[in-house]
Image (spheres, grey):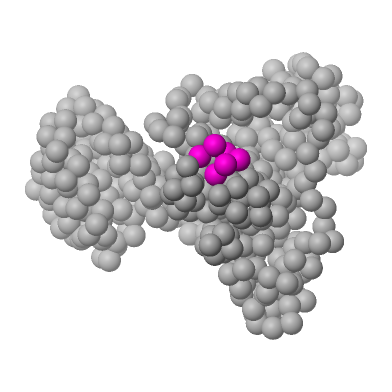
């Protein structure tokens, strides 16, 4: 790489790591913990690429993007942030940052993106429009896991795209919530948001009335593949009547629409009208690391109604080890009940256990286990992950990421099956015991469980 990179981050370790890595790659580096200093450098014409954190002691890195674009429209800016929320991702996209990476980031990945930014910087000649929306700092999408970061990126990409969006996922995963966020953060936010469920279709009058109510806003078809054929026909006619200046159409479905069409649950003509962007929400089981964050979020909402409680560490661990067949909705309801019934200011592991004992566990389908080989199941999930990105490729580092996703549950289940005996677990897995110990540490298998193992 060849060029000068300006680095702004209040974490000295990150500044040191980036400075050393970029210098070894052949770049000149100027690093600072101050946005004021960064903006002075930019104003002086220094740097070919900027790498900046969001939350800095003297300001917000995202708020600097419009001024950087005005002063140096040819200067690519890569945003890195530990504030891994949907708002951060959307604001970075709206401000047209060159790239956005959530912390902790993969250093080789950041280096590749920096190299690409340097190449673009050499070739770029035109300006870039900036439009940071003055939106609230919080939205009800919570999660910092890799699957949710991918969801945030896709939401940011489709916000103002003039094409239908299909949100798929299990019941309770938050499909309707994501659809609402897409509307509320888009250019149509001041227009109506009309939800058409099966009951709403039964009550709705003429198509002209629905279109008049929606205006140039958004129409959401909830659980589109569950609608009777007659209502699906109405949806087809509604989309045809809308024209180019009508509302935008979103839909939710527990099934992939192509699968629903193949099974005769979705009309072909409706499928082809809705076949735009597809956004698949992960189940709560696929983002276990978000369970504690979500539980604390729902508990904070309960505190607003007078229930002042916190979770004991062991209680959060118990929540993480439940399968949550009802996904986020089930977790929200469980936390609400715990907040109201807890005997003290701290919700205990015993109270969580009692609450979960009365709820269903996720039972695997014996038929699916016998009919589908493990390799076929993995292939299906990998293909779906690629499909999530449309025409773009997933972020670099996919091989290691997928191996980790497979390795973590394998070791945890093996540890459970052997009662936490590391010697038996290592023998079962065919690993050296020291190798197993290292993997337990590297994969950050829970402290509570590690204590039980020692």
Percent x, y for residue 287? 59, 47
Q: Which residues are magenta?
A: 426-431
Image point (33%, 36%), residue name: 109
Q: Is residue 384 shown left or right of residue 115? A: right
Q: Is residue 12 above or below residue 6?
A: below
Percent x, y for residue 418? 65, 50
Q: Is residue 284 visible?
A: no
Q: Is residue 148 above or below residue 290?
A: above
Q: Is residue 34 shown left or right of residue 379? A: left
Q: Is residue 224 above or below residue 273?
A: below
Q: Is residue 423 visible?
A: yes
Image point (18%, 40%), residue name: 22
Percent x, y for residue 72? 19, 40
- Front position in the image: 173 or 130: 173
Q: Is residue 206 magenta?
A: no
- Front position in the image: 399 or 114: 399
Image point (34%, 48%), residue name: 80
């Amino acid at each position: 790489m060849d060029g000068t990179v300006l680095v702004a981050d209040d974490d000295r370790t990150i500044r040191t790591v980036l400075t050393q890595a970029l210098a070894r790659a052949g770049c000149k580096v100027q690093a600072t913990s101050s946005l004021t200093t960064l903006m002075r450098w930019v104003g002086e014409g220094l740097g070919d690429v900027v790498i900046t954190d969001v939350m800095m002691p003297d300001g917000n890195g995202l708020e600097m993007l419009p001024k950087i674009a005005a002063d140096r429209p040819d200067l690519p800016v890569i945003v890195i942030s530990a504030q891994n929320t949907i708002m951060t991702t959307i604001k970075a996209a709206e401000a047209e940052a060159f790239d956005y990476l959530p912390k902790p980031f993969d250093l080789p990945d950041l280096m590749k993106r920096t190299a690409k930014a340097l190449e673009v910087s050499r070739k770029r000649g035109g300006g870039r429009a900036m439009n940071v929306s003055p939106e609230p700092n919080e939205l009800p999408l919570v999660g910092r896991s890799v699957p949710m970061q991918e969801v945030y990126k896709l939401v940011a990409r489709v916000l103002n795209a003039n094409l239908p969006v299909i949100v798929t996922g299990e019941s309770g995963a938050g499909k309707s919530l994501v659809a609402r966020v897409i509307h509320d953060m888009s250019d149509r936010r001041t227009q109506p948001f009309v939800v058409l469920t099966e009951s709403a279709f039964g009550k709705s009058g003429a198509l002209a009335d629905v279109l008049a109510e929606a205006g140039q806003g958004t129409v959401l078809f909830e659980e589109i593949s569950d609608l009777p054929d007659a209502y699906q026909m109405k949806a087809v006619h509604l989309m045809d009547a809308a024209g180019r200046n009508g509302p935008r159409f979103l839909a939710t479905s527990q099934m992939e629409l192509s699968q629903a069409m193949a099974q005769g649950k979705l009309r072909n003509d409706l499928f082809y009208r809705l076949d735009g962007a597809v956004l698949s929400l992960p189940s709560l089981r696929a983002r276990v690391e978000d369970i504690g964050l979500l539980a604390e979020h729902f508990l904070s909402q309960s505190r607003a109604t007078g229930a002042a409680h916190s979770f004991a560490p062991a209680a959060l661990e118990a929540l993480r080890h439940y399968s949550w067949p009802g996904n986020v909705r089930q977790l929200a309801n469980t936390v609400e009940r715990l907040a109201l019934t807890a005997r003290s200011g701290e919700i205990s592991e015993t109270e969580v256990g009692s609450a979960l004992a009365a709820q269903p566990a996720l039972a695997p389908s014996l038929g699916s286990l016998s009919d589908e080989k493990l390799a076929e199941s993995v292939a299906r999930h990998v293909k779906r992950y690629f499909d999530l990105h449309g025409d773009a490729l997933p972020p670099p580092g996919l091989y290691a990421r997928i191996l980790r996703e497979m390795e973590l549950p394998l070791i945890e289940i093996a540890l459970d099956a052997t009662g936490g005996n590391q010697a038996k677990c290592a023998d079962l897995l065919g690993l050296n015991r020291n190798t197993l110990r290292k993997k337990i540490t590297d994969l950050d298998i829970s402290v509570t469980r590690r204590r039980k193992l020692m």
